[in-house]
Image (cartoon, rainbow, N blue to C red):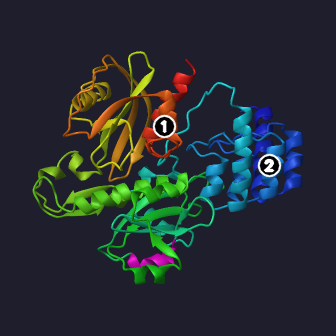
Amino acid sequence: MSDRTNMYNNYVDQLHQAAANGDVEAVLESLRAIPDVNATNSRGWTALMFAARNDHKEAVTVLLDKGADISITNSVGQNAVDIAEFWQSKETASVLSKATETQEHLAAELPVTTKKSNFFCDSPLDRMSQRRNDKEWLESLTTKNETIYVLFTRLQPLAKSNPVPPKYNLVRFSFAKAKTFLSSDATVVFLGVEHGSSDAGDDSDVRNAVGWFAVDCGDLTTENIGSLEDGAVLLSNPLDLFQLSRSEAAIVGQARSLLAWHERYKFCSTCGSATIVEDAGYKRVCVSDGCASRKGIHNTSYPRTDPTVIMAVMSPDRSQILLGRGKRHRLNMWTCLAGFMEPGEGIEEAVRREVHEESGIRVGQVDYHSCQPWPMPSSLMIGCIAHAQSTTIEVDKDELEDAKWFDASEVHQMLIRKHPRGFFCPPEQAVAHQLIKYWVNSVHKL
């Protein structure tokens, strides 16, 4: 590395440190030495992110005035707003949200070069999979004062309501407060350590790492919950998870999927014997020495993820989109067709099969759009754009209540919930909403 590069990196570090400390004068001094207000470190963090993380409203305002870009994301997909919301920096989050609207308006005519990840992504944690079988490291992390525990009962996380968005924040317990629930029969899973929790950038160092764990507390009564944290509630409705910040929703998604797996796979699917938890919650091992699952690598021992295709089906001329209503859907909600992938099946094959089974429509080209972890209990939604080759609908009543073609103007009314008949689409946190919105935008550009 050249002396010039070293000097540049030192100036970037000074700028970031000044922003993290909320030292406005030092920020301005650093910007005189290095005019790039959006300079990033090795983890993709900008000065604006550091100021947002520590709720330094004045430093955030100065950086925005100097041209800081809110849309920049770090190595785990978080922008400054996401970071402010995750760290509950409410004043800073409000400033950034207002500035975001301004920046988006100014950038409205520019081509989109990046695609934001979907809800339940953007985790602020490094999962540290290489440390899951390091018992000494995990035990040291478990008892640290800085370590955070999130509690679940019947897969419902404990949270507190906010007077301003996000509506809910997870209740974060220290080891001292959570240890009551850390009995020998409690299910505890290691979620990871916070990115950037080590000043040296070495998250493997337990002295600096801020760890996160999820605990299944069994059945908690209303009285138990009230005694744990004043004003605490259980997020019992899956839609409540949409009212968390993106970062905390990603943490809940990871935790909920793992805890659901542990709840359902207490016994070996190969021989029926009991199983025990290993690898910090990412593996279950049969207690029977003679079981075939103890030899080699068996997927019965590891957490389950179910791949599911979900698709926006465009008519042959792209002027209409095919939407369906499932029997379990809320009244008047229309959404993308979806279905589980089958063994030995490619994504494109699954899309074509599911669309034809449910609606009778034949699909040709299939394009990947984006994906979304879906912790109900543990699916991976693989979002696609499907190009129809036919238009005659034959609904499979065992699969769907109904299916129809809609034009862009009507779908736009459904997205903003102003349809004259009360029709609507899933909320923006769902990948289905993003697929439908993508199609509407593509039609407007034709």
Q: Are marks 1 and 2 in contact (CB under 8 Å)?
A: no
C-alpha separation, residue under disc 1 versus residue under disc 2 = 39 Å
Q: Residue furthest front?
A: 420
- Displayed quadrant of residue 271: bottom left
Amino acid under disc 1: Gln
Looking at the picture, how far across and down is residue 72, in whole percent?
A: 66, 39
Tell me the magenta residue range: 173-181
Residue 14 - label: 2
Does residue 198 appear in the picture of this structure?
A: no
| Residue with the mark numbered 1 | 434
Looking at the picture, how far across and down is residue 71, in whole percent?
A: 66, 40
Task: State which quarter of the image contains the N terminus.
Answer: top right
Q: Is residue 191 left or right of residue 218?
A: right
Relative to 386, say whether 303 is above or below. Answer: below
- Select label 1 or label 2 by which is in front: 1
- Find numbered disc 2 in the image and state the secondary structure of the residue it sits on: helix
- Out of 192 and 237, give the one closest to the viewer: 237
Q: Is residue 261 magenta?
A: no
What secondary structure is the stretch in magenta mostly built from?
helix
Looking at the picture, how far across and down is residue 371, in whole percent?
A: 43, 37
Amino acid under disc 2: Gln
Q: Residue at x 75, y 49 (%)?
A: 16
Dot 1, crowdedness within 10 Å: few (<14), some or many (≥20)? Answer: many
Task: State which quarter of the image contains the C terminus.
Answer: top right
- Out of 297 and 428, give the one closest to the viewer: 428
